[in-house]
Amino acid sequence: MTQPGYEEVLAPNQYFDRNFDKEAAKILPGEYYATGRDMLLVTVLGSCVSACIRDPVSGIGGMNHFMLPESGNERGDPLSNSARYGGYAMEVLINQLVKLGASRARLEAKVFGGAAVLRGFTTVNVGERNSDFVIDYLRMEKIRLVAHDLLGFHPRKVYYFPTTGRILVKKLKSVHNNTIIEREREYGSRLSTSRIAGEVELF
């Protein structure tokens, strides 16, 4: 039986944040959001990583939330399924930003996540793999990295204001339930049983 293709999803969870008095979108694992409006994008990261990317001239920006799938011993292989999926997850967001009017040549990024919260989940630290991947990807694509907060042992809550580039990061040092970890485990196992939707071309 052929597994369905795995595809990034435009974040469906939108709400009004009374604290910041703004429209907001909550980005879960495997989701992204891109906008030219004055909005707030919010996510909570454990081992996953999030790239917050914007065009500082147009104010168009967005956020994704992804994890590399586990595909055996493939560390450092640029043609591996994990690298192909990671590139796909980044390109979906970047292509959406360009479609909204952002200039790819002007894009800048801030990246977060990659904490070691899934210890025992894999033989390799999945947070470290995710962090290494996103830094390498931005370097390869010549997208300027202006800030990052990666690795460590605590989940993070990230608030991103794409029109200004402002970021607020809160380390969640005492998490009262396993929602973050369980959500990422479920996402990771979904990735491992799916193929990437469509063909992904590295360039």
Image: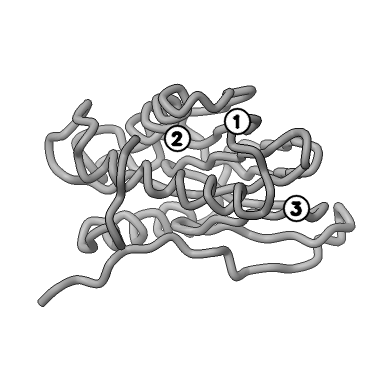
Q: Is residue 102 above or below residue 32?
A: above
Q: Is residue 69 left or right of residue 38?
A: left
Front-most of 35 and 48? 35
Q: Disc 1 on helix, strand or loop?
A: helix
Q: Which amino acid does label 3 sit on?
A: Gly
Colour mode of the rendering: one colour
The residue shown at (78%, 34%) is 57
Residue identifier under label 2: 115
Tell whether label 2 touches label 1 (CB within 8 Å).
no
Residue identifier under label 3: 36
Q: Residue furthest bottom?
A: 1
Q: Disc 3 on helix, strand or loop?
A: loop
Q: What residue type is labelled 1?
A: Ala
Give the x, y percent position of residue 92: 47, 52
Mark 2, residues whose alpha carbon is within 10 Å: few (<14), some, or many (≥20)?
many
Give the x, y percent position of residue 185: 34, 55
Residue identifier under label 1: 105
Give the x, y percent position of residue 18: 86, 61
Q: Which of marks 2 and 3 is in front?
A: 3
